[in-house]
Amino acid sequence: MAASQKRGNRALLAGLLLLSLLTGCGDQRNQPECGDVYKSRMDEHDFDVFDGGMARHRPTGLTVTQCAVGQRMSNYQCRGDSLKLSWDAAMTYAAEVAEKTGEPWRLPTKNEIPKILEKKCINPAVNPFVFPDLEVANFWTASKGLHQDMFRCSFYTYQGRVFCRQARDIPQPFILVKSN
């Protein structure tokens, strides 16, 4: 095979790889912010909101904390600073909450998160009346990645995407869930 033909084949492969990467990524630049989609607490959504900072996602049956761990619900707002822990410390925290409350609180899995987040809006990808003041950050999930043991899965609240190559020792916020 001639050198020019090999270069052409490599260029074609590189172009196809780039095209497949670009088409696999959703363009969210034109998506509205969730605060513009949900105008009031009365807007249709998939959650039953309870007193005490919890909501139940009807389609999955998951009960979720409306605020990041470390914050508290007061007058429909999350107050205080979120607790930012490494993945191991967040998992330990959730286990301690479960033990002390007698309820199965835990971090959500990477497969549960996309089901409770919004797909039609961003910044953050949640209903602001269900999850008020949720910071735009990477939040821990309970899931391990398929890669080395030093990585775990998190979700980015801006777009709601899950990423499984997050170094497990980085302090990040998290929410808790329990199955009903």
Image (spheres, rainbow, N blue to C red):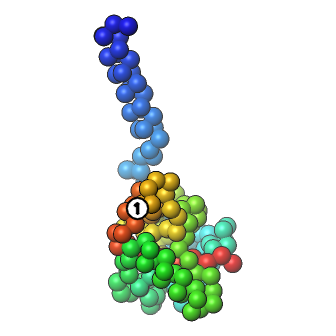
x 59%, y 69%: residue: 45
Q: Position of residue 24 (x, y in %)?
A: 47, 41
Q: Position of residue 37 (x, y in %)?
A: 47, 64
The residue identified by callout 1 is 150
In what quadrant of the picture does the C terminus appear? bottom right
x 40%, y 24%: residue: 13
Mark count: 1
Work out whether residue 64 or residue 151 is closer to the camera in this orientation and state it: 151
Rendering quarter of residue 177: bottom right
Work out whether residue 42 or residue 34 is closer to the camera in this orientation and state it: 34
Three-letter amino acid code at disc 1? Met
Outermost residue, top side = 2
Work out whether residue 50 or residue 14 is closer to the camera in this orientation and state it: 14
In what quadrant of the picture does the N terminus appear? top left
Q: Is residue 71 above or below residue 170?
A: below
Outermost residue, front side = 149
x 52%, y 69%: residue: 142
Q: Is residue 55 visible?
A: no
Q: Is residue 106 visible?
A: yes
Rendering quarter of residue 113: bottom right
Q: Secondary structure at mark 1?
A: loop
Work out whether residue 80 or residue 43 is closer to the camera in this orientation and state it: 80
x 34%, y 22%: residue: 11
Q: Position of residue 2 (x, y in %)?
A: 33, 7
Q: Position of residue 163 (x, y in %)?
A: 44, 57
For disc 1, the neighbor class at 10 Å (few under 14, some 14 to 19, many from 20) is few
